[in-house]
Image (cartoon, helix red, strand yellow):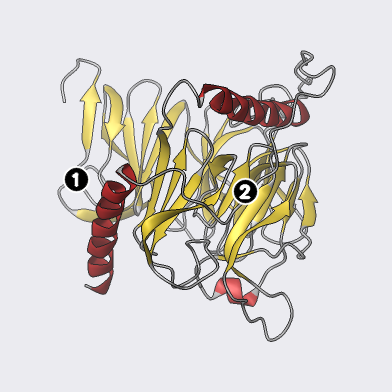
Amino acid sequence: MLRENKTMIATVIIFMALLVYGGYSLLSSGTGTAPPVYEEPPGYGEECEPEPGTPGRQPITTGYMACNCLQNGEDIARTRRLTAANAISRASDSPVQIKSLHPDPYNNNVLLLETDGSLWSWGWNHWGQIGDGTFLQRNIPIRILNNVAEITPGGGSAILADSSLWAWGQMRSQEPPFTHSAPVTPRHILDDVAAFYPGTNRDFVIRLDGSLWAWPNSPIQAWGMANLVPSENEAPVHILDGVVTVSTNNSIALAHRCDGSLWDVTGDAAVHIMDAVASFYMTDTLNVRPSEILVIQTDNNLWAVDTSGQQHPRRLLDSVASVYKTGDRAFILQRGGSLWAIGAGFLGTSAMTFRSDPVWVMDNVRSVYPGWYGGDHVILHTGSL
């Protein structure tokens, strides 16, 4: 009930603030500043050739990896700079518009990014998540940063057009007694950042050269306190190179490399899990088996892989086209149109059940639209729903 009330309050705050924002002057002064947009370095943009694959390690083109991590990190940086430069050049000819809106129903605050790179914030502020250096609630948007390229997952941090990472709110301490600081306005954390992944127990960053770095585990972070971001004086630890993406849950962190290999990066030492991985799905709420993940390899075989190393991988299905994970369940669609289900709940039946191995649901399926606990819909190859 308390969470529902908080969600209702957050919704009211969002709509009221948007109404205010519509008439709010963009000339209002903010507390954040950002470096200028940089020009392209001489000789930038040469074509790169894909790195040759080796048996069992086929290069894949997911995320921002098209031919190699270094080149694609440079592409990310170039795109951010050009987008910012174009926004500045168009500012005099067209009005500034909303680029993206990021409401946080749990913490009851909102982040709004404009096409000119201005980042605005408002709502509740009990963790300093507004970024104005106070704990005071704000019902009117305040600009906290300029020249922003993207808001990172979870809020409380952003990547600027120059690929630098900035964060605000309460900075966590790495020294006993592991207390947190007073809230701060946006502070510079790290340069040359391709992507930032805040986690429950530690935060990860992929840099433009494809290297993966992580901040050490912090007990205060594990307590679930919101918006405890790395300090600018806190040095990350190098974990792995050639990384495409990172996924985390409450117990494990996984890194997907450019060569298709999958690694456990929960600790400071990376542990190899499997090669030739096309995609993978965390199963923290799927209840397949403890510590298992679902992995589709480049040959389209689906595996259940025990990341603890205590069980051998289980081959579940072949010729898999896609996996639709929802709540405690997952639907698996084969290339021939056969639909399967795994996990706990309504697995294509009228009764709740649990299966650690796939159970057949129906054939001739073209696409799947699962609900959270039920209410699933499919479209058949005949076009019927």
Q: Position of residue 261 (x, y in %)?
A: 69, 38
Residue 259, above or below 165: above
Residue 69 shown left or right of residue 280 in the figure? right
State the residue at coordinates (49%, 71%): 127
**Whether residue 190 is situated above or below residue 383 in the rendered picture:** below
- Quarter of the image where the N terminus is located: bottom left
Residue 100 visible? The answer is yes
Whether residues under marks 1 and 2 lie with C-beta atoms below 8 angstroms apart, the answer is no
Check disc 2 and report the residue beneath it.
196
Say how many tags the image has.
Answer: 2
Distance between mark 1 and mark 2 Cα atoms: 40 Å
Q: Nearer the viewer, mark 1 or mark 2?
A: 2
Question: Of 13 and 57, which appears nearest the observer?
Answer: 13
Q: Report whether residue 287 is seen.
A: no
Question: Looking at numbered disc 2 in the image, what kind of residue is underneath it?
Answer: Phe
- Residue 277, percent across and down? 61, 35
Q: How far across and down, in percent of the image, does residue 51 sit?
A: 78, 21
Residue 283's disc is none
Is 230 in front, or is 168? Answer: 168
Q: Nearer the viewer, residue 206 or 12?
A: 12
Element carrying mark 1: loop
Q: Amino acid at mark 1?
A: Thr
Q: Is residue 162 above or below residue 334?
A: below
Q: Secondary structure at mark 2?
A: strand
Going by the picture, which residue comes out furthest to the right? 42
Q: Residue reaching furthest bottom? A: 177
Residue under label 1? 349
In which quarter of the view is residue 383 placed? top left
Badge 2 density bin: few <14, some 14–19, many ≥20, Cα 10 Å: many
- Of the 4 image quadrants, the one containing the C terminus is top left
Q: With 321 as the anchor, is 58 left or right in this view?
A: right
